[in-house]
Image (cartoon, rainbow, N blue to C red):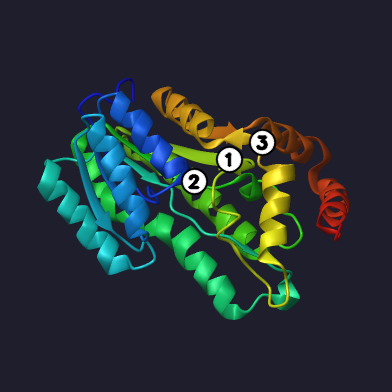
Amino acid sequence: MKSFAGKVVVITGAASGMGRDLALQLAAKGAKLAISDMNPIGLDETVAMLESRGAEVHSQLLNVAEREAVLEYADTVLAHYGKVNVVFNNAGIAHHAEVEQTSFKDYERLMDVDFWGVVNGTKAFLPHLIASGDGHVVNTSSLFGILAIPGQSAYNAAKFAVRGFTESLNQEMQLAGHNVKVTCVHPGGIKTAIARNATVADGSDAAQFAAMFDKKLARTTSPRAAEIIINAVEKDRARVLVGADAKILDLLVRVTASKYQAVTAKVSGSMLKPR
């Protein structure tokens, strides 16, 4: 994707955070945008910001976990713009709780949004990306799709699944000879609202967890994260690590293999102790 000028770009989870910053930066590059989210107020704010910059934008409320709605949305975007070139499957949620305190419904909810939302978006738009002759799928996994930590089993499971799904898709596009590139994104700690909006185990302090994340783990700003991701897509990179923490911990896993788990368990335990 050498240039986004005139390209139709779909972004889920665009009401705030990386989704909003991706939209703003891509608009500056001349992209035509189709943005969605479940948050109507945040989505309207993003639309207003884009339109104030002269961007062409189509917006729609969308729950990426609802497959039929996503399939209909893909047809709507195609009818509106006549083509689709890029899809950023960015929408996601978080849940912090140990396995013993995580309900089956919590696992299902995380997987429905964070994994199935990516699958739904990819499957719905892939035929249109192939037809465009210049397509790109960008799926947001996480640093936690590379290594696991305590208290994040649901999120880890979803993000590891996104990584496997996306890497397999990349190989299939190459084998089929389709001009569709695929990028798997692994952000580290990003200064967005995902931790503040995360659910936690019953009896746990959601505000304390959010404050800890913002203070100790969120090292990269959302605009900077969006810039890194867009640069990687322009260079057709299959994998992008966002933030120094993502790069360092990816190296830790590569060097130590399964032994990294002892390190992250100790560090996580220290961070989560009440102060």
Contact between marks 1 and 2 (CB within 8 A): the answer is yes
Quadrant that contains the C terminus: bottom right
Distance between the alpha carbons at the discs numbered 3 and 1? 11 Å
- Mark 2 = which residue? 140
Rendered image: mark on residue 80: none
Residue 136 placed where, x, y %?
Answer: 34, 36
Per the image, label 1 sits on a secondary structure element best described as: strand
- First in sequence, mark 3 or 2: give its number: 2
Write the residue at 66% across / 65% down.
206
Q: Earlier in the sequence, mark 1 or mark 2?
A: 2
Front residue (pair 97, 236): 97
| Viewer-side residue, 47 vs 157 | 47
Image mark for residue 219: 3
Q: What residue type is labelled 3?
A: Arg
Residue 187 marker: 1
Q: How many labels does the image show?
A: 3
Q: What residue type is labelled 2?
A: Thr
Question: In the drawing, does residue 130 fall left or right of residue 150?
Answer: left
| First of labels 3, 1 by sequence position | 1
Choose between 190 and 108: the one closer to the eye.
Answer: 190
Residue 266, given in percent of the width and then of the height, sits at 88, 52
Q: In which quarter of the image is the N terminus?
A: top left
Quarter of the image for residue 220 reads: top right
Which is closer to the viewer, label 3 or label 2? 3
